[in-house]
Amino acid sequence: AGHGGTPGGCGWRRSNERCSGAPALGSSSSAWLRGELQMAFPSKRACVSKTSEPESSRVPRLNFSSNVTVDSVCKAANQGCATPFFCPLNRHQLEAELKNKNQLVETLKQQLAKKEIRELKKENERLVHEVEKLKKIQGTCMTILESRNINPGKEFSLCLHPGTPSPECFFSSTLTKKVTEELTLFCHTVAKEDEMLETAMAKWKSVQEENQRALEKQSDFQVQIKECTAMLEALEELLAM
């Protein structure tokens, strides 16, 4: 059995030494045998890694670190999406809203101007009517005085002095008092009409100032519309990129 080629026999040892030129099996020869076997037959793990390398190189590896959350991944994925504010429909809505506000301001301005103009016309017509009426009264009084050959200024100056020798002083003084009262009333009325006319002119001036402010607001709205349009066009260009 020892010479028949068993592993423990000398014949197998000699044949092994003749074929491979390896030293006799021992503590040093076992290491040499393992090295020869590893070179001839690579390990299964190495073969698997070599065969799996092309497959792994084709498919990208998704290595998520522990500090990357799902929310951050979703936010990063949604960064390319347009928000509703940048939607082209909102641009038309904003322009329509600004146009509606502009039209509302213009309508209110026109209504206010028409109302003030209507009131001022009525007030002017009333004042003209009052002035014409007072002129008629004044003309009537002057006609009465001229028919009686009375000079209001002269008679009034004579009646101021009680010792005047004129025989018609009493009658003239009575008539002069009436005329004086009417003239005084006329002067007060004219003063009131002047005040009312000044008030109407002040109202007219305030209406003109309000109209000017409305025009300035309208120009501001136009500037805002242009700025918003430019901003929206720039945002659309950015979104198109």
Image (cartoon, rainbow, N blue to C red):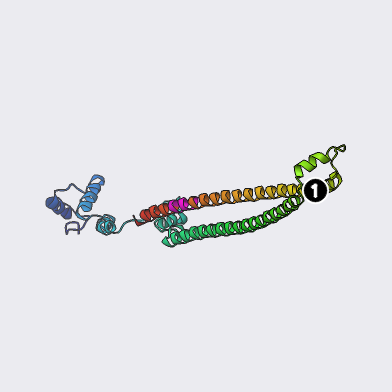
Q: Position of residue 111 (x, y in %)?
A: 58, 60
Q: Nearer the viewer, residue 177 or 84?
A: 177
Quadrant containing the C terminus is: bottom left
Q: Which of 71 and 49 is in front in this view?
A: 71
Q: Where on the picture, by quarter, is residue 235?
A: bottom left
* Mark 1 lies on residue: 181
Q: Where is residue 199 in the image (x, y as percent from the top left)?
A: 66, 49
Is residue 66 in view from this perspective? no
Q: What stretch is highlighted in magenta?
A: 220-227
Amino acid on which disc 1 is placed? Glu
Side (left or right) of 52 relative to 166:
left
Q: Is the magenta stretch mostly helix, strand or loop?
A: helix
Q: Which of 184 and 223 is in front in this view?
A: 184
Q: Position of residue 29 (x, y in %)?
A: 22, 47
Side (left or right) of 18 relative to 142:
left
Q: Does the magenta stretch include residue 180?
A: no
Side (left or right) of 212 relative to 200:
left
Q: Residues within 10 Å of mark 1 (few under 14, many from 20)?
A: few
Q: Residue at x 25, y 57 (%)?
A: 54
Q: Position of residue 88 (x, y in %)?
A: 41, 61
